[in-house]
Image (cartoon, grey):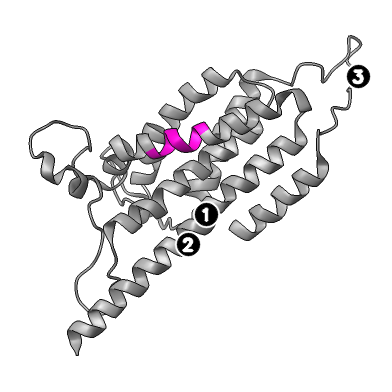
Amino acid sequence: MEDQIFQLQYAIDTFYFLVCGALVMWMAAGFSMLEAGLVRSKNTTEILTKNVALYAISCIMYLICGYAIMYGGSIFLSGIEGGDTLVADALASKAEEGFDGGSVYSGASDFFFQVVFVATAMSIVSGAVAERMKLWAFLIFSVFMTGLIYPLEGSWTWGGNAVFGMFTLGDLGFSDFAGSGIVHMAGAAAALAGVLLLGARKGKYSADGSIKAIPGANLPLATLGTFILWMGW
């Protein structure tokens, strides 16, 4: 009977991870539609390409090194030795054994749930620098954001590691159950830095300094993206 309860708990918890991860992943469609609707029509193709590419980069970088930095364990492509366990090491399970309130779930489902949050943080940056930044420059930054910056601040919070070996944020009373700081504030901080560095979009200001309106290409599409984001959140 206890084994059956364990199997049921494992299946339900894993399924819940996958469903929640799918809802967060659905936000990528919302970001894409929102950005494509609010930029000028000539930049729509680049915006859509950027949103697809950042998701691919996020998954690759988090698999190679991001997950290991955030939660510890072997780096996925750290070497050929022990190749038969590389995937298992990269997707190191965070499951807790026992029935005393601990959760039991698949480590791979946890990785999926975590990686869509990484892509979400990068999508926030994408919207802020739309029509301000070259595609290649954005993709280069996304490598560092998803492979180093996000995992490093994530290791100090959800990972429970000490900040540069000095102290832990938990000792200071910090907690973030849903990612308001770890995901959204991290993406917003990177977005703000990008906007301050890059400045306004070309054509936003006239020669005398007056503001020129830049209407979006497709407001119904932007509205659809907004509702998709609400659903994902």
View extreme (bottom): residue:
1
User: Residue under circle 2?
Assistant: 20
Q: Tell me which residue sits at (18%, 32%) in the image.
A: 78
Tag 1 secondary structure: helix
Magenta span dominant secondary structure: helix
User: How many numbered circles are shown?
Assistant: 3
Query: Which quadrant would residue 173 be assigned to in this image?
Result: bottom left
User: Residue under circle 3?
Assistant: 210
Query: Which quadrant would residue 212 be assigned to in this image?
Result: top right
Q: Give the crowd class for mark 1: few <14, some 14-19, many >=20 residues within 10 Å.
A: many
Quarter of the figure that contains the C terminus: bottom right
Tag 2 secondary structure: helix
Query: Which quadrant would residue 153 be assigned to in this image?
Result: top left
User: Residue under circle 1?
Assistant: 24
Viewer-proximal residue among 220 and 181: 220
Q: Nearer the viewer, mark 3 or mark 1?
A: 1
For the residues marked 2 and 3, what is the alpha-carbon distance in whole angstroms? 45 Å
For the residues marked 2 and 1, what is the alpha-carbon distance in whole angstroms? 6 Å
Q: Does residue 129 appear anywhere in the picture?
A: no
The mark nearer the N terminus, 3 or 1, is 1
Q: Which residues are magenta?
A: 53-59
| Image-based side of 29 in relation to 65, left or right | right
Q: Position of residue 217 (x, y in %)?
A: 81, 33
Q: Position of residue 3 (x, y in %)?
A: 18, 83
Q: In the displayed structure, would residue 107 be above or below residue 98?
A: above
For the residues marked 3 and 1, what is the alpha-carbon distance in whole angstroms? 39 Å
Q: In the displayed structure, would residue 182 be above or below residue 124?
A: below
For the residues bearing labels 2 and 1, Cβ distance under 8 angstroms: yes
View extreme (front): residue:
45
